[in-house]
């Protein structure tokens, strides 16, 4: 649920400040304005909320402090009493918390991508098996072994992260910050060396979104490289292709550098300008991305 900024009552702003405080991992009792707007589900630069915060401060419901030069807000005793009354009256209904939205979105993404992660791991294992089956006297070079080691590690990390995010990440409660301590309750009795090893192994396991961003970035780089290769093969200049595809030279340069995510109509225009079918272009980009990940 997202409440229009103009309709946000003061008790809801107080509730957002309180929930943002609860969800702070560092235990601080004051929160910045961007955290307040985030818990209200509205744009950070909402002028109406800023005016409400100023009015709440003037009324004594909240107080301002500063941390590292940034204005922070916290509830006063009067503000806490006002919030308690509003809760008892059933007046508080905040939108989904940021930490719950992160859990839900990451879980959905992991569900969509886990089969692809499984296939990537299978492909890496098959490639490593083929290398092992090669004759020792005329087998892979040391660099090829180092590269397959990186590919295996990356594929297994992606699959492990997707598995954790889909099946093992507990749904967060609004009553506490969602912190991944990387230890299960029964593991807290282990000695410090074992706990350190477990925490190190699980470092970044909630970062599945960043893994997907990494894959997307690799795809964009592969797309740009493919466009440059096709231009070179057909002796088409960058300016000529930009003109054929209806793009500015700067936009084509950004695409070829992997800095711009082209829409489908741009992909079609580039395929037409390069005299290839869209399917052939996409397949070649996929091959390029796979080669780059290998």
Image: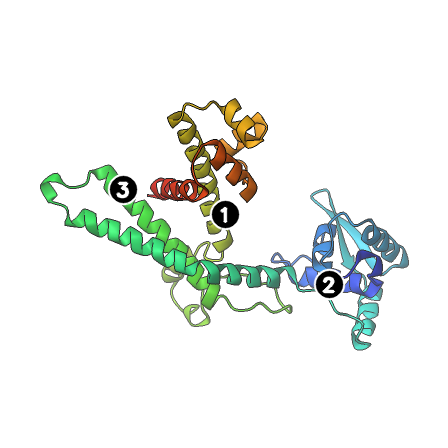
Rendering colour mode: rainbow
Q: Position of residue 178 (x, y in %)?
A: 57, 63
Disc 3 residue crowd, few under 14, some 14–19, many 20+, Cα 10 Å: few
Q: Quadrant of the N terminus?
A: bottom right
Q: Residue at x 30, y 56 (%)?
A: 122
- Residue that mark 1 sits on: 213
Q: Quadrant of the C terminus?
A: top left
Q: Secondary structure at mark 2?
A: helix
- Is mark 3 in CB contact (under 8 Å) with mark 1? no
Q: CA distance from mark 1 to mark 2?
A: 32 Å
The residue singled out by tag 3 in the image is 146
Question: Does 231 sit above or below residue 145?
Answer: above
Whether the residues at callouts 3 and 2 have beta carbons within 8 Å, the answer is no
Mark identifier at residue 18: 2
Residue 292 location, quadrant: top left
Distance from label 3 to label 2 (Cα)? 51 Å
Q: Residue at x 54, y 32 (%)?
A: 245
Identify the residue shown where x is 44% and y is 33%. 275
Label 1 secondary element: helix
The front one of 176 and 105 is 105
Query: Which residue is drawn at the image coordinates 37% and 27% (left, top)?
Result: 233
Closest to the observer, 44 or 177: 44
Q: Secondary structure at mark 3?
A: helix
> Which comes sooner in the sequence, label 1 or label 2?
2
Going from N to C along the chain, the mark reached first, 3 or 1, is: 3
Q: Residues within 10 Å of mark 1 (few under 14, many from 20)?
A: few
Total marks in image: 3
Foreground mark, 1 or 2, reads 1
- Residue contact between numbered discs 1 and 2, judged by CB atoms under 8 Å: no
Q: Nearer the viewer, mark 3 or mark 2?
A: 3
């Amino acid at each position: 649920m997202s409440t229009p900024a103009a309709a946000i009552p003061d008790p809801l702003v107080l509730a957002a400040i309180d929930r943002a405080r609860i969800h702070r991992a560092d235990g601080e009792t004051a929160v910045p304005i961007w955290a307040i707007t985030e818990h209200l589900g509205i744009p950070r630069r909402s002028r109406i909320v800023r005016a409400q915060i100023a009015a709440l401060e003037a009324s004594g419901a909240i107080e301002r402090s500063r941390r590292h030069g940034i204005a922070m807000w916290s509830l006063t005793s009067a503000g806490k009493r006002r919030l308690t009354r509003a809760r008892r009256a059933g007046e508080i209904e905040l939108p989904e918390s940021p930490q719950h939205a992160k859990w839900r979105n990451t879980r959905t993404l992991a569900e969509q991508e886990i089969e692809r992660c499984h296939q990537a791991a299978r492909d890496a294992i098959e490639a490593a098996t083929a290398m092992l089956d090669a004759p020792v006297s005329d087998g892979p070079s040391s660099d090829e072994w180092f590269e397959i080691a990186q590919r295996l590690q990356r594929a297994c990390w992606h699959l492990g992260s997707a598995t954790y995010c889909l099946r093992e990440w507990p749904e967060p409660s609004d009553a506490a910050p969602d912190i991944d301590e990387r230890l299960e309750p029964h593991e807290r009795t282990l000695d410090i060396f074992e706990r350190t090893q477990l925490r190190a192994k699980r470092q970044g396991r909630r970062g599945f979104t960043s893994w997907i961003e990494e894959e997307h970035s690799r795809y964009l780089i592969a797309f740009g490289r493919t466009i440059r290769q096709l231009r070179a093969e057909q002796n088409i200049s960058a300016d000529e292709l930009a003109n054929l595809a209806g793009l500015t030279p700067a936009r084509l340069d950004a695409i070829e550098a992997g800095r711009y995510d082209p829409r489908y109509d741009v992909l079609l225009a580039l395929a037409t300008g390069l005299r290839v079918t869209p399917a052939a272009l996409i397949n070649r980009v996929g091959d390029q991305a796979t080669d780059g990940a290998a």
